[in-house]
Image (tube, rainbow, N blue to C red):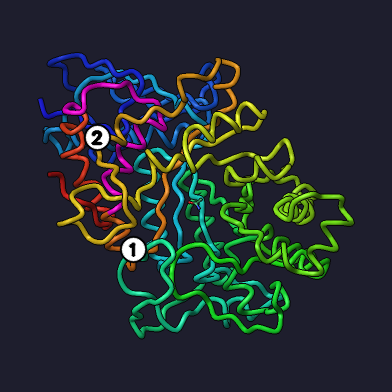
Amino acid sequence: MPDIAIVPAPRELTVDEGQWVSADPAGEAIRDVVENLGETEYRIDVTADGARLSAGSEDALRHAESTYAQLLDAAEPAEDGMVAVPAVRIADAPRFAWRGMMLDVARHFMPKEFVLKVLDVLALHRLNTLHFHLTDDQGWRVEIAAYPRLTEIGAWRDETMVGKMSRGQKDFEYDGQRHGGFYTKDDLREIVAYAAERGITVVPEIDLPGHMQAAIAAYPELGNNPDTQLTVRQYWGISDDVLNVNDATVEFVRTVLREVLDIFPSPYIHLGGDECPSVQWAVSEEAQKRQAELGLTEPGQLQGWFTEQVASVLAEEGRRLVGWDEMVETDCPKDAVIMAWRSAQRGEIAVKAGHQTVMAPCESVYFDYYQGDPATEPLAIGNFIPLEKVYDFEVIPASLTEEEAALIVGTQCQIWTEYMPDEQQVGYMLLPRLSAFAERAWGSPRMSYDEFLTRLRPHLARIERIGVNYRPLD
Ligand code: ACM
C-alpha cells in the first residue's frame, strides 16, 4: 500500500489494513455538517459503503476535505475511472485555535499573487491565520485614502543596504535599486476574501509607535523632529525615529486604523508594540510635557498611553488588540492578546499576567533564521533553526499550570524578510519548516522525526503543485 502521507497528521487515524474502497478521484464523497460533533471536529470514514466526511461546522468540513484530498494521493487506479482508496477512519480536531504564520511584506514587498499562494499553503496545512505585517521603517504597504503620501512616499525606498548588517553598523553599501510597492484596498479585499474561502483570517498589523519611519518620512509632523525630512529607511535594525505623542498624531493613527478596520473584518487587529526606543521622547519638550501631565516616571511609559489612545478605535468596533510581548510591560489593556516573540519565557510572563497568548518564540519558530550551514546557505539574519528543531517544538511551556496553559490560544511562525528579497527566498525559508510547525500547531501525535520525514517527502509534491519554492530535504 502506498504510504498515507497526511500533513499535519490527524489526531486519530485507523487504517483497515488491506481494505480498499472505490472512490471518485475528483474527491466526490458524502459531506455533512452534523450536530453530534464539536465545532472544530471532523471525521472521515472510508468504508465499504464509500467515503463519508462529517464535521461540526463548515470550517471543520473544509479541514475534512483538505485531509481527504491528501488521502486520495494514496489511491490506486481502479475500474471505470474510479480509484481505490485505503479504508480508514479519521477523527480529528485542532489542539489550538490560533494556528498562524506572520508574513513581513514591509521589508520586501511581495506581489498579491504570491500572497494568494501563501494562503493556499496555509490551507494545505490546516492553518487558519495570516498575520500580515503591513508597515515598518522600510515600507508602508496599505493604501489609506485620508493620507495618500503613506503609499506615494512611504511605500518606496531609493535603495537597500547590501549584505548582512552588524550591530551598531553605521556605514553601508547600497544596491542603487528602488524598491517598493503597496496593496490597494481592492487588492487587500481580494486577499481577505480568498483567505476566508479557505477558512483563514487575515490579521493586519500596523506596527506602532516604533517601526514607523516610513510613515514619518511621508508625514514629518508625526515624528519627534518634524523639521527633519527622513527617508524611508534603507537599512535594517531598530530605528530611534518613532511617532511623537501629540494629540494630532493620535488622531492621525485613529483615522488610519478606521480605514484598516474597514478593509479587514478580522476580530483581531495587531498594533505591534515591539522595539520602540524612547530616546527621542526623553529629549522632546512636548513628550516630556505629556509625561509630566500624565504623572509618568519614565519616557518609555508613554508607549502604553499612546497605544491605549489609538486602540480605543478597535474597542469601538468590537475588535481585540494584539501586540508583541513588549506590550505586557507597557500597561496594555488586560484583554490584549500577547504574541510572545522574544522567548517562550516571555509567553509565560504574559500568561501569568492574565493575557491570552500566542506562542511565537524566536528560538523555535523564527523562519528567518538559518536552517543549514551558513557557509553554504543563502544569507540569513543568523542563529539556527533546522527542520528537526521545529518538529520538536512544544507550544506550551512545561512550567505552566493547567489553568495558565489554557490562556495559550495558539502558536505562530514568523517570516521576517530583511534577507528575503523575493518570493523564491521566502518559499525557501518557509518550507518545509512550516510543515513541521503545522504538526505542532494542529497537535498531531508526536512520532519519530523519521516518520515525519516519510510523510513529508511525498507532501513536497503538493507544495510544488501550489507553485511555492521550498528547501529540498538534505
Ligand atoms: C520582532 O521580531 N521584532 C517582533
Image quarter of residue 279: bottom right
* Residue 298 horizontal/vertical position (percent): 74, 51
Mark 2 and mark 1: Cα distance apart in space: 22 Å
Q: Is residue 208 visible?
A: no
Name the residue that disc number 2 marks: 388
| Residue 85 visible in the shown view | yes
Q: Is residue 392 above or below residue 425?
A: above
At horizontal 87% and vertical 52% (from top left) the residue drawn is 294
Residue 56, percent from left and from top: 52, 25
Residue 433 lies in magenta, yes or no? Answer: yes
Element type where label 1 sits in the image: loop
**Numbered mark located on residue 420 in the image:** 1
Amino acid beneath label 2: Glu
Would you say 20 lies left or right of 244 here?
left
State the residue in front, 345 or 444: 345
Amino acid found under the numbered disc labelled 1: Met
Q: Ligand 1 within 8 A of label 1's CB?
A: no
**60 on left or right of 313:** left
The overriding secondary structure of the stretch rendered in magenta is helix
Q: Let me know if residue 79 is in the magenta part.
A: no
Magenta residues span: 429-451
Between residue 160 and residue 473, name the one nearer to us.
Answer: 160
Quadrant location, the C terminus = top left
Sequence-wise first label, 2 or 1: 2
